[in-house]
Image (cartoon, rainbow, N blue to C red):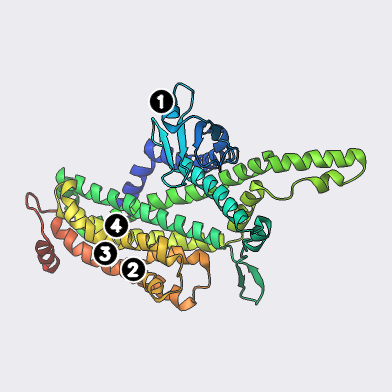
């Protein structure tokens, strides 16, 4: 046991003390929060920051003249020239594209020196369709106002019944986002830290350091110490990421809420109300905008069982890593270079790839289906499938207990199998291993 602890200590501190570990640990949360804030800012300012497109319209039908609405990125100008004449002087006249609308409304074209963007073309199609539909309704004698009222969109508020019978917000969108993010982090980390174990085994094997080490410790002790040591590095990094991300997101969220247009309008309204002795300005202030939506999303995430989700995440990360790292270590012991690992990597990682791909479409929409339940119980797929299901809640206790027990038993069995291959593979040189060879190594006696 003391030898395993020494190996764990060496693997852990040799990685934690590296500058790359410290930089990555503190930089990732900052980049992650910055990315979210940047995406939100750019999305809100897309009309101001986007390229302005000037479009010259040749409307041979006469139906769309002065009826297409300008946007923050598109400006329409109308001409009485023919399409050929307008096209010949398009760039000279300072336009980016020519919108040619034939009299029959078939074969509408957008012509330009550069390919039109998807969103620009979609916006033009939407404008043309709206004007055309309004015209057709008018010809048919249908009041567009009455039709718009009849086509009013109905929004659904998802609710769920709590354990005590109370009705509360289901927070479906927040559960979806947290579930997919948790599954992605586990998917990413199993590859990242499992590959570190595999590369470490290959490096020690190729440099022949392993021959010296094996003279002092058993192969199983070496493998287990390496797996646990690297796993503790990953666990340390994830705990720090969670703490830093929560802290930074709280600070960023507070700053954004304080500096949002909604907050500034409310401050102005309160100031006006206090100076006039009335609350008319406050009542006149807007009550809902994009900032309210952002606040609603943050509130939805905060109302999820975050503590339980983090606990389950740490468990499934730990045992998922231990299970797969044992297999990665076995693969590393069977080859002499990283390029030779490809033939063994696909069968090992295929369950992860399959479950993550299926999780984004099937599991999130059917978290309680038979397939989702089985995927959350099978050890090789459980870390990802269960982390997608957990934020949606209402997982029966027997499923959680069965999943946890299967993960623990799966780790023990996988480690035993990998250890039997590892003990032989680390001392094999110059011979390309095959699946048949791995089976022979497994059945070799001590």
Disc 1 is placed on an element classified as helix
Relative to residue 1, is residue 335 depicted above or below? above
Q: Which residue is mark 2?
A: 379
| Percent coordinates x, y for residue 75 in the rendering | 55, 33
Q: Which mark is residue 88?
A: 1
Label number found at residue 415: 3
Tell me whether the residue at label 4 lies in contact with that at label 2, contact meaning CB atoms closer than 8 angstroms: no
Image point (15%, 45%), residue name: 206
Residue 51 seen in this snapshot: no
Q: Nearer the viewer, mark 4 or mark 1?
A: 1
Up-down relation of residue 315 to residue 202 (above or below)? below
Q: Nearer the viewer, mark 3 or mark 4?
A: 4
Q: Secondary structure at mark 3?
A: helix
Residue topped by disc 4: 325
Residue at the spot 47% in from the left edge and 37% down from the top edge? 99
Residue closest to the eye, 437 or 142: 142
How many residues crowd around disc 1 within 10 Å: few (fewer than 14), some, or many (20 or more)?
few
Q: Nearer the viewer, mark 4 or mark 2?
A: 2
């Amino acid at each position: 046991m003391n030898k395993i602890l020494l190996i764990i200590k060496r693997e852990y501190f040799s990685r934690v003390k590296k500058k790359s570990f410290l930089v990555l640990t503190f930089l990732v949360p900052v980049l992650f929060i910055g990315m979210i804030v940047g995406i939100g800012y750019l999305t809100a300012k897309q009309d101001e920051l986007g390229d302005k497109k000037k479009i010259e319209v040749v409307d041979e039908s006469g139906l769309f003249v002065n009826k297409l609405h300008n946007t923050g990125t598109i400006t329409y100008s109308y001409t009485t020239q023919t399409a050929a004449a307008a096209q010949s002087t398009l760039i000279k006249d300072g336009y980016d594209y020519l919108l040619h609308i034939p009299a029959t409304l078939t074969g509408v074209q957008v012509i330009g020196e550069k390919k039109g963007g998807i969103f620009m073309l979609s916006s033009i199609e939407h404008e043309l369709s709206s004007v055309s539909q309004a015209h057709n309704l008018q010809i048919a004698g249908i009041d567009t106002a009455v039709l718009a009222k009849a086509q009013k969109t109905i929004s659904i508020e998802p609710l769920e019944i709590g354990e005590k019978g109370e009705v509360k917000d289901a927070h479906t969108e927040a559960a979806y986002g947290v579930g997919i993010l948790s599954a992605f982090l586990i998917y990413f980390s199993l590859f990242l830290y499992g590959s570190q174990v595999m590369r470490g085994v290959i490096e020690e094997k190729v440099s022949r350091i392993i021959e010296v080490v094996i003279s002092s410790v058993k192969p199983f002790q070496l493998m287990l110490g390496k797996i646990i040591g690297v796993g503790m590095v990953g666990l340390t990094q994830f705990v720090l990421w969670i703490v830093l991300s929560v802290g930074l997101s709280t600070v960023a969220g507070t700053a954004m809420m304080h500096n949002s247009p909604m907050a500034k309008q409310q401050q102005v309204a309160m100031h006006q109300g206090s100076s006039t002795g009335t609350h008319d300005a406050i009542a006149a202030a807007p009550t809902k905008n994009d900032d309210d939506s952002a606040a609603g999303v943050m509130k939805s995430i905060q109302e999820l069982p975050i503590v339980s989700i983090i606990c389950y995440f740490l468990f499934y990360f730990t045992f998922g890593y231990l299970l797969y790292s044992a297999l990665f270590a076995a693969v590393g012991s069977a080859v002499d270079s990283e390029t030779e690992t490809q033939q063994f990597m696909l069968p090992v990682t295929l369950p992860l790839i399959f479950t993550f791909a299926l999780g984004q479409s099937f599991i999130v929409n059917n978290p309680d289906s038979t397939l989702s339940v089985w995927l959350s119980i099978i050890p090789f797929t459980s870390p990802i499938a269960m982390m997608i299901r957990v934020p949606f809640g209402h997982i029966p206790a027997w499923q959680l207990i069965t999943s946890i027990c299967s993960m623990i038993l799966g780790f023990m069995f996988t480690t035993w199998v990998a250890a039997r291959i590892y003990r032989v593979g680390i001392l094999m040189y110059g011979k390309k291993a095959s699946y048949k060879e791995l089976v022979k190594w497994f059945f070799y006696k001590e």
